[in-house]
Amino acid sequence: MELHQLRCFVAAAEQLHFGHAAQQLQMLPSALGRQIRLLEEDLGARLFARTTRAVSLTEDGATLLRDARAILARVEAVENNLRNRSRAGAARRLRVGAIDSAAAGLLPPLLRDFRDKHPDIAVQLLEDKTVRLLPKILTGALDLAFVRPPDSADKRLEFRDLLQETAIVAFPQRHALAERKSITLAQIADEAMLVPDRRSRPHSHDLTIKLFEQAGLTPRIVQVADEKQTIIHLVATKLGVAIVPRWTTRMAVSGVRFVPLRPKQSGPVGRLPLAAAWLRGSRDPARDAMLAVLEARLRSYAREA
């Protein structure tokens, strides 16, 4: 005996018309009739007396109807209770997406501070690229994301500019310039450059291009790669040098030295923007709680960027 069979039986017993009961359950009359027959076979009892003109309940059918209603009411109560518990649990869960830069730099101290203030909220993390994170906010798969702000933002999304990440240069460890305290674009003008793919990392790609343009130079690009970790490993193999965010120094890759970059002029050109993004007009206490912690500690986080 299955719950679906009981629901079919109760609908037929209350309607005393298989066609109307099937319509109520949005199924074919033949499918309803089959469920009733299976239930009767399982119980070894006739539940309906059928004639060419009418359907009525047998004595066993009337007994089962009373018990089936009680069973289904109890099942519905259990289901509702679990759904309510699930909703309450969801309110204590925050799904956060982050680009690799934010996952390595901003999120560790932010999550530490957030957990201190809100230990009851579980945070689920997803690391991906901006072009993949923003659609997940729109579909409801993420509540909050830390991304590079796009040049053309979807109006359904809300953005909060957070900080600008400092650019540095990654050299092979034994490179002639690797021991410098700082470096200029002119000093690496003739170096083989490794850059991210613009289709997936437009900000990181454009950072190198714009820095060279600002200095009146053209980069000699020898390799494009999708992941920053791949680029750092390529630097270690002496394939070239790369301009990367400062957080990249936290990667445990041997054979690479990082040197601060001195841009031709101060300003945002030599830095990478980081922003928080969420669904415009949505209400989410857990998300707002994280944004409040972020706002309170932003200056401290920005000093490490």
Image: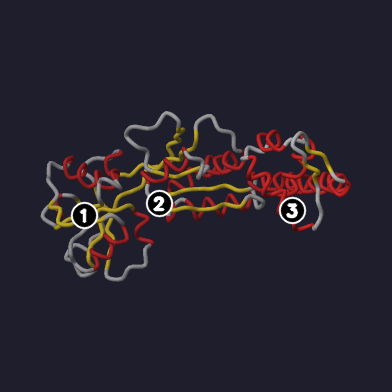
Whole-percent x and y of residue 302? Answer: 43, 46
| Of labels 3 and 2, the one closer to you | 3
Q: The residue under label 2 is which amino acid type?
A: Asp
Q: Earlier in the sequence, mark 1 or mark 2?
A: 2
Instruction: Kindly identify which numbered label has been placed on residue 128.
Output: 2
Find residue 224 and name its label: 1
216 relative position to 68: left or right: left
Mark 1, Cα crowd under 10 Å, few <14 / some 14-19 / many 20+, is some
C-alpha distance separating marks 3 and 2: 51 Å
Q: Residue at x 43, y 48 (%)?
A: 303
In this rendered view, identify the residue nearer to me: 96 or 232. 96
Q: Secondary structure at mark 1?
A: strand
Q: What's the mark number on residue 43?
A: none
Q: Residue at x 70, y 33 (%)?
A: 20
The quadrant holding residue 133 is: top left
Marks 2 and 3: in contact by CB < 8 Å?
Answer: no
Measured in 3D between alpha carbons, the distance from the residue under mark 1 to the one under mark 3, in whole angstroms, is: 65 Å
- Residue 139, compared with residue 230, is above or below; it is above
